[in-house]
């Protein structure tokens, strides 16, 4: 769930950057871009930590 959310937020960031580069019509400001990229990073880290915890619990360690 967190990995999918991270991918969706990153796609929104990428779409904003692409629209700004090719069409000149970005829908987020610089601060907005930073916050969206930060949210994608945090969601990705949470997803990886959850997967690692699940793997550790599965192995019984």
Image (spheres, helix red, strand yellow):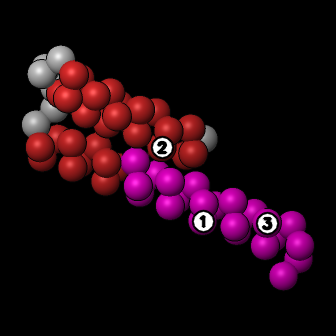
Q: CA distance from mark 2 to mark 3?
A: 20 Å
Q: For the C terminus, which image quadrant?
A: bottom right
Which of the two labelled residues, at mark 2 and mark 3, occupies the earlier sequence position? 2
Q: Is residue 58 left or right of residue 23?
A: right
Q: For the N terminus, which image quadrant?
A: top right
Whether tag 1 and tag 2 are in contact, CB under 8 A, the answer is no
Q: Identify the disc placed on residue 49.
A: 1
Which percent across, then down, holds residue 3?
57, 45
Using the image, determine if residue 58 lies above or below residue 31: below
Which of the two labelled residues, at mark 3 and mark 1, occupies the earlier sequence position? 1
* Residue at image point 60% right, 60% down: 48
Count how many numbered circles sit on residues in the image.
3
* Residue at image point 50% right, 61% down: 45
* In the image, residue 51 lies in the stretch drawn in magenta: yes
Which percent across, then down, holds residue 41?
41, 55
Q: Is residue 55 left or right of residue 15?
A: right
Region rendered in magenta: 40-61
* Nearest to the observer: residue 61 or residue 42: 42
Q: Is residue 34 in sight in this rendering? A: yes
Using the image, determine if residue 32 lies above or below residue 54: above
* In the image, residue 37 lies in the stretch drawn in magenta: no
Q: Which secondary structure lies at badge 3?
A: helix
């Amino acid at each position: 769930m967190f990995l999918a959310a991270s991918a969706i937020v990153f796609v929104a960031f990428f779409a904003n950057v692409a629209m700004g580069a090719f069409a000149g019509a970005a829908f987020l400001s610089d601060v907005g871009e930073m916050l969206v990229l930060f949210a994608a990073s945090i969601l990705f880290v949470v997803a990886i930590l959850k997967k690692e915890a699940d793997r550790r619990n599965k192995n019984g360690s």
